[in-house]
Amino acid sequence: MTDPVRVRFAPSPTGRLHIGGARTALFNWAFARANDGAFILRVEDTDSERNSEDSLHSILASMRWLGLDWDEGPEAGGAAGPYFQSERRDSYQAGIERGLAEGWLYRCFATSDEIQALRDAHREQKAHGCWASPSRDLDPATAERRAADGESCVLRFRVPLGEEILVRDHIRGEVRFRSDEVEDWVAVRSNGMPTYNFCCALDDDAMRISHVIRGEEHLVNTPKQILLAQAMSLRVPDFAHVPLILGEDGKKLSKRTGDTALGDYIDKGYPPEAMFNFLALLGFSIDDKTTVFNREELLAHFDLKRISKGGALFDTAKLHFLCAEYIRHTEPAELAQRLQPWLDQAGLQPPSMDSEQAGSDSASTSRKPWLETLANAFRERLGLYSELPDKAAFLFSDHVEIDDKAQKALDAEGAQDLLLRLAEALEQEPLFPPADWSAWIKNQAAIMEVGMGKLMKPMRAALSGTLGGPELADILVLLGRDRVLQRLRGASVRS
């Protein structure tokens, strides 16, 4: 019988959730869900000087936005807690005392400058193996007395010499390290707080983590954590190191080449489903042709063997394609709900609503069909939710900004007369817009003895100020009879 799958995502609350961290969280979540396992959120908050509540709340909110729910962790609880490292100091202290007693931890009194000098000299001499701390062979009793007298020191892990450290990686296969090339790493800082590698190995064992799925940059930490686990007779989890995310310049994704925090994309109106799909594609594929897939399809195919070793390109063109694709296939009622905050943020209310009505329940109910019509009219024309206010501004204003191409259409010979005749015909219609708009406008063109283009272009220009945008039938519905007639007549007398 195999152990149950238990994976963890362990962010540090020192900033917003990075795109790479979001992708790592997604892969862990998917692996847990695809294998009937548990997804655990553990907060690595040992850096007390940089931690913040705002960062923690931002990380949790970003994960929820992406649709990543956790089975254990902050706000969820669980039997393997606490899930904040700052609350697990007793277990770390027990490990520290054991390490000093058994000798695999030792006190190092060398200053950071002295250690750097050792590294530099070792590099210049091209010496074999790794540099050695001058405190490595210090008598433990002497070291303890010096520490008791107040001399500052860190605790280093005593890396055994002449051993091979084997990492069995689900993505990279067998990766071998020589212990001689691994430095005696700092396990406990001079302030008494354990470091990442020390806490990580102990917590993974205490929380019964079966698989550690994380970024490739952590591969160098793996031999250190394996050595600590072996020294303490802890269970060594399986590992899977996912590829780096590369910017379009082929280098590691950085702020120089674009946004790196998930919150930046949330703030700019990216659909969460599109970002979920896109992040899943950063190193993973269902097959060689499928680009668009939902959560259920991802979980049906998710396997660590499908994750590539090579760097994953952050292709912004593909991301924008996915955004437009998901917006286009969102039902109007759902899309209206998602778009409304962006209209509210821009101060845009349906034209029939004044500021007093806008906050009432009846106003909210009456505006719903209008907003759904708006969403349906624009869903083929949006790449981001945040684009709507600019694209739809002409529907919310009494004044229409006319661009150059639209003005040219309005200035065309006979255009003003056609708009007046069109307004008269629409005013006489009992239904607005006419029930069969396409047939109606074709009939008007025939009556006026002009081609459809000569009638439709100035009409669109007068109503929206541009020659692009939604279908004219939708514009008529959204503007309403009075404003349509007003704009057609106003354009006919515009100088």
Image (cartoon, grey):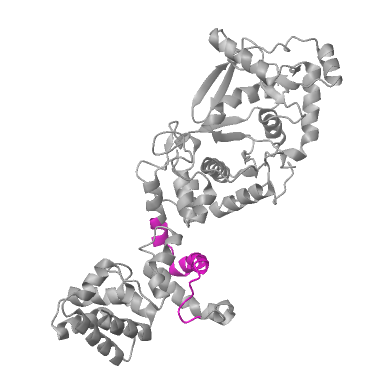
Q: Position of residue 4 (x, y in %)?
A: 63, 38
**What quarter of the picture does the C terminus occupy?**
bottom left
The overriding secondary structure of the stretch rendered in magenta is: helix
| Residue 435, visible in the rendered structure | no
Taking depth in this image into account, of 40 and 391 the one nearest to the observer is 391
**What quarter of the picture does the N terminus occupy?**
top right
Please say if 435 is above or below 244.
below
Give me the residue at 45% from left, 61% from top: 386
Please say if 33 is above or below 267.
above
Q: Position of residue 220 (x, y in %)?
A: 57, 25
Q: Is residue 325 magenta?
A: yes
Give me the residue at 47% from left, 82% from top: 352
Quadrant of res 46: top right
In this view, the residue farthest toward the left is 449
Q: How many marks?
A: 0
Taking depth in this image into account, of 403 and 9 the one nearest to the observer is 403
| Residue 246, visible in the rendered structure | yes
Give me the residue at 71% from left, 20% from top: 156
Quadrant of res 416: bottom left
Taking depth in this image into account, of 360 and 160 the one nearest to the observer is 360
* Stretch in magenta: 324-353
Q: Is residue 445 magenta?
A: no
Q: Is residue 112 left or right of residue 220?
A: right
Q: Position of residue 95 (x, y in %)?
A: 77, 26
Taking depth in this image into account, of 234 and 259 the one nearest to the observer is 259
Q: Is residue 168 left or right of residue 47?
A: left
Please say if 167 is above or below 311.
above
Quadrant of res 472: bottom left
